[in-house]
Image: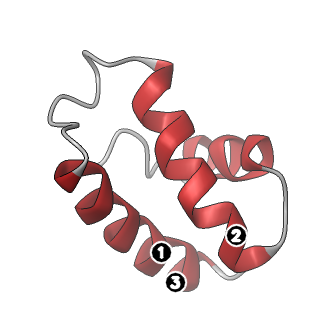
Amino acid sequence: MPPTLLEESLTEAVDTARQAGFTEWDGSGETALGFIASHICRRFGVPAEVIARRLRIEECWPPK
């Protein structure tokens, strides 16, 4: 998955997470990351754990 598509997906997932009540990315720990990774993984057809790891590697987590 190209980094630009991952970032676009993250932006969409963050909006969805905010609507679900997530507001503090660091304070909610792995729960927010899991929610967002689960949302993104459907788009790419990979496990949520892969997305979570990739978000950390690309330094996209926590979102700005």
Residue 64 seen: no
- Using a 10 Å C-alpha cutoff, classify the residue at mark 2 as few (fewer than 14 neighbours), some (14 to 19) or many (20 or more): few
Q: Nearer the viewer, residue 63 or 34?
A: 34
**Above or below, comparing residue 17 to residue 30 in the picture:** below
Q: Earlier in the sequence, mark 3 or mark 2?
A: 3
Element type at marker 2? helix
Q: Percent position (x, y) of residue 50?
A: 79, 49
- Amino acid type for the residue under numbered disc 3: Thr
Residue wearing tag 3: 4
- Alpha-carbon span between mark 3 and mark 2: 17 Å
Q: Relative to residue 61, is residue 20 drawn left or right?
A: left
- Which quarter of the figure has residue 44? bottom right
Q: Percent position (x, y) of residue 24?
A: 18, 28
* Numbered circle sitting on residue 38: none
* Numbered circle sitting on residue 42: 2
Q: Nearer the viewer, residue 29 or 42?
A: 42
Residue wearing tag 1: 9
Q: Nearer the viewer, residue 8 or 16?
A: 16
At a point 43% along the width and 42% down the height, the residue shown is 61
- Alpha-carbon span between mark 1 and mark 2: 10 Å
**Above or below, comparing residue 1 to residue 29 in the picture:** below
**Above or below, comparing residue 53 to residue 25 in the picture:** below
- Amino acid type for the residue under numbered disc 1: Ser
At a point 67% along the width and 78% down the height, the residue shown is 43
